[in-house]
Structures are given as structure tokens and as C-alpha cells.
Amino acid sequence: MTQGTEIDRSAVDELQATFRGDIVRPDDAGYDDHRKVWNGSIDRRPAIIARCTGVADVRAAIKLARSQGLLTAVRGGGHSFPGLSVCDDGMLIDLGLMKDIRVDPEARTVRVQAGVLLGELDRETQEFGLAVPSGIVTHTGVAGLTLGGGIGWVMRKYGLSIDQLLSADVITADGELVRASERENSDLFWGLRGGGGNFGIVTDFEFRLNPVGPYAVAGPVFWKMEDARDLLKFYRDWTSDCPDELMTIAVQRRAPALPFVPPDLVGKHVIGVTACYAGPVEDGERVLRPLKEFGSPVLDFCQPKPYLEHQKMFDPSFPHGWHYYFRACDVAGLSDEVIDVVAEYGMRIVSPVTSIALWQMGGAVGRIDDDATAFNGRKAGFTFNINGNSTTAEGFDAEREWARDYWAALAPHHTGVYVNFLMEEGQERVRQAYGAAKYERLKALKRQYDPTNFFRLNQNIRPD
Ligand SMILES: Cc1cc2nc3c(=O)[nH]c(=O)nc-3n(C[C@H](O)[C@H](O)[C@H](O)COP(=O)(O)OP(=O)(O)OC[C@H]3O[C@@H](n4cnc5c(N)ncnc54)[C@H](O)[C@@H]3O)c2cc1C
């Protein structure tokens, strides 16, 4: 692959002649906006950005990139933690203009193009009281999230995003359009459900829809961090036997300076449990009562609210442009030793925008056959997401170190890692994310669909 910015002028002219979207080069207006990704610590300058409007544009962009030997990045929502959806010097295939969403309320299905964000999808499906299980921040892309698995508030009831995926249209490295489903190219369909962008560019997703909301009992309850050990022991017991409708995420951070936070609490270390009960409101109130009554909460915002509103709850904590560093791992359960690590490292949080999210897994996710999809980790008890963040470059190194140290302290308890929560951590970590057997199966698929590793800016499964 060439790393320089020299692209044959006539090849670009030829692309531009029929391209329906925009071609953006470094000297063009808007270049800096279009090369930006969500993580502000990533600053890369592609030689050409192809802002596609559909399948024909995607095929044309791939053709140009291949003919010019360009390193190629593919962007859906641009939320890759390590910034894999942008590159220096090469081609950026940006799918952000592909926004079509078509709900069929009768059939309970939805067709979604690759540039759609989670909030846009929820907006359309909730109109009919339906939803695709997806993630917890509305500006994340449906495409990248789904291709890695997709964990979120209703997964314990309806499974991962991939568990409701019915089909996908894929453009392979040689420009072919391939439909993948249980009936067509089922091997590829298996690999797409967890294998990321390794096999081609998905232009359209078709999902099954399920009833959700429109109201859910949802939101956070917070305690002082000093209560972390007692709270987590209670939480461990309480969640060991809870209905699939309930999904929770434990959060550690310093209380933010927001209007609803009492001034004397701002900046203090707090631990919270954020819940979403995806079932009848009165059942949710009953199930959540023991949590709300535990110890002495310092804040309680857990109440009936529109599901759409709850989906946006974490948006302000993860805006575009801050500097983000993440480490992640699965653990089987919250042993006393794990709880000790959580209590200790929670107190060491310095940045007001650093946090951890400890996801409760299980329910429907764990009941689906592990071999059914490439996603690995259905048996995980909890997933840690350790976020060392700063609003600018200042202080970022220290946050990164804190996240690494927290993660390292949990190392004796790691059971795996969710591929969408990896940074650029090397080939061995990608293999760990899939496990040896799935990794070998994915490698064979990669050899079939992308033998030259054209799609390499992802958690890469190498064909060789
Ligand atoms: C703020 C935030 C919140 C998050 N919350 C959750 C959550 O609740 N649940 C969860 O499961 N994950 C979550 N994640 C992780 C998220 O799933 C991944 O970061 C995911 O890759 C984001 O998808 P995207 O389309 O926005 O990313 P992008 O950066 O556009 O893409 C990510 C990867 O997917 C590839 N890709 C993107 N689109 C396509 C396509 N159409 N065809 C082929 N390959 C493609 C890219 O090349 C890249 O390698 C979150 C991430 C962030 C930053």
C-alpha cells in the first residue's frame, strides 16, 4: 500500500464524474470537519474522503482505492475508540450520508443504511413502540456497533444487536454486492455478527423489531464511593436473580457540576447503579425498590421516563472531541477481590470526566448458543469499561495511566474482552477477544472474502 498522498489525477476525475456524494481533498472546504472522528485524541489526514450516498458510490470508492493502492478506512458513526475509521494519507470511505431508515411495523422489521446513528434509529422505531437492541449513547453508529455485537439496555431481554439482525448487504473488497443472512451466504452472516468490518462494507442492515417502552423505569442511583464495597456486595446478590427485563450498569466517577447535583456533592467520588427496566412500569418499580432503598443514596434519578429519554442519558458524558482512552475486560462475576479493586481505583479518579462503566451481562445474551455468531463472551458475568478521559490533551497521559493500572489490577480476573471495547492492542488481543477456535474460523472467512486484507483498519483478522 502506498502511504503518500500522490493519487493519479485522472483516476480522481474519473471517480468524480459519476460519484453522487462528495469527494473531499485536503485543500477543499470542510476537509477538517470531515476527517474528524469522535475521539479528539485522534488527528489523521486522509488524502481523499469519499462521502458516499449509496452502493454505487461505495463500489466506485473501493475501485479507486484498490487501483491506487491506498490504505483505506471505513466510517459509519466514527466512534471507534482507537480511531480506526480514519487514516493518514489514504482513502476514507465515509458512509455518514447514508441515512435511510425504513420501519415495517406490521412485519416488525427495519431496514437501516450504514450511516445511521443509534438515536436516529430509535426515533423511527419508537414511533411504533418498537426497538432494536443497541447501545447507550445515541450518537454512536449502528454499523460499527452492530458488526462487533452491540450491547445495551435491552440486551438481557432481546439479546445483542446481532441477535436481531436478519440480513446485511455487503460490498466485498473486489466490489461485489453480497447478501448475507441465515439462508444466503450463512458463513459470511456468521462472521459479520461479531467479526467487525473485516469482510467488506455493509451498506444496509435489516433487523427484527421488538416491543420496548415507550416508558421504562430507568436512571441512576448514586452513593458515596466510600460505600462501594457494601454496595457492590448487595448489587452482586440483587442482580444474581433478577428478571431479564432489568439491565444495570454500575458507574464510578466524580459527581459532575450539573444543575441537579447538589453543590456540596460536586467533585466528590461517587458510585452509582444505572438501571433500565424494559417491562411494565409497576413491575419495574417493584423490582428496583430494594436498590433504591439500599444504604443512604446521595442522588436518585431512577423513575419512569420515556425510553428515548433514557437512551440519551449518557450523551453529555461522552461528547465529540474530548480525549478518550479505554481499557476493557470481561469478568465471570463480582468476587470480593474484584470488588476490592473497584473500590480502590474508584477513589483514585482525578479527572472530572473520567469514569468506569461495569455492565451487567447475562439474560438473553447468555442463552443464545455461543457458536451461533462470531461474537465471543456470551457467558461473561460483567464487562468492565474503564474510561480515562480529559477534555483536552492536558492531563490525558495521567488518565491513560490510571485506566491501564485499573485494568492491570483486574488482570487475574479477566475472562475475555468485547471486541468493540478494544483500543489498538495488538493481534494477540484480537485473538483473545474471539478465542482460538472462532479466530481460526474468522481467518478462513477472511481468506475467502478479503484475501489481500484490503479491509485492515479494524480489529484486524489477518488472512495469513
Ligand atoms: C461514546 C461511545 C459509546 C459506546 N457505547 C456502546 C454501547 O452502548 N454498546 C456497544 O456495544 N458499543 C458501544 N460503543 C463501542 C462501539 O460499538 C464501537 O466504537 C463501534 O465501532 C462504533 O461504531 P461506529 O459506526 O460509530 O464506528 P466507526 O468508527 O465508524 O467504525 C468502527 C469500525 O467499524 C468499521 N465499520 C464502520 N462502519 C462499517 C460498515 N458499514 N461496514 C463495514 N465496516 C464498518 C470501521 O471501519 C471501524 O473499523 C461505544 C462507543 C463510544 C465511543
Image (spheres, rainbow, N blue to C red):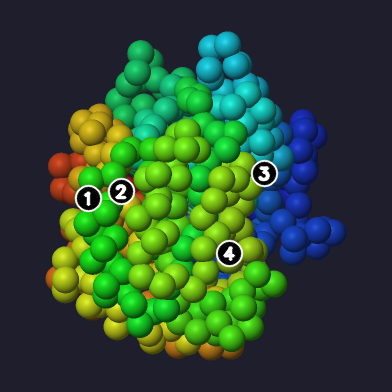
Where is residue 106, by image quadrant? Answer: top right
Q: Is residue 387 visible?
A: no
Where is residue 41, by image quadrant? Answer: bottom right
Q: Nearer the viewer, mark 1 or mark 4?
A: 1
Give SS at disc 4.
Answer: loop
Q: Pick whichever of labels 3 and 2 is earlier in the sequence.
A: 3
* Disc 4 C-beta below 8 A from ligand 1: yes
Q: CA distance from mark 1 to mark 3?
A: 40 Å
Q: Is residue 164 left or right of residue 94?
A: left
Q: CA distance from mark 4 to mark 3?
A: 19 Å
Q: Nearer the viewer, mark 3 or mark 2?
A: 2
Give SS at disc 1.
Answer: loop
Q: Is residue 4 above or below residue 94?
A: below
Q: Is residue 150 above or below residue 333?
A: above
Where is residue 445, by image quadrant? Answer: top left
Q: Is residue 223 above or below residue 213?
A: below
Residue at which label 2 appears: 361
| Residue 422 image position (x, y, % from top left) | 37, 60
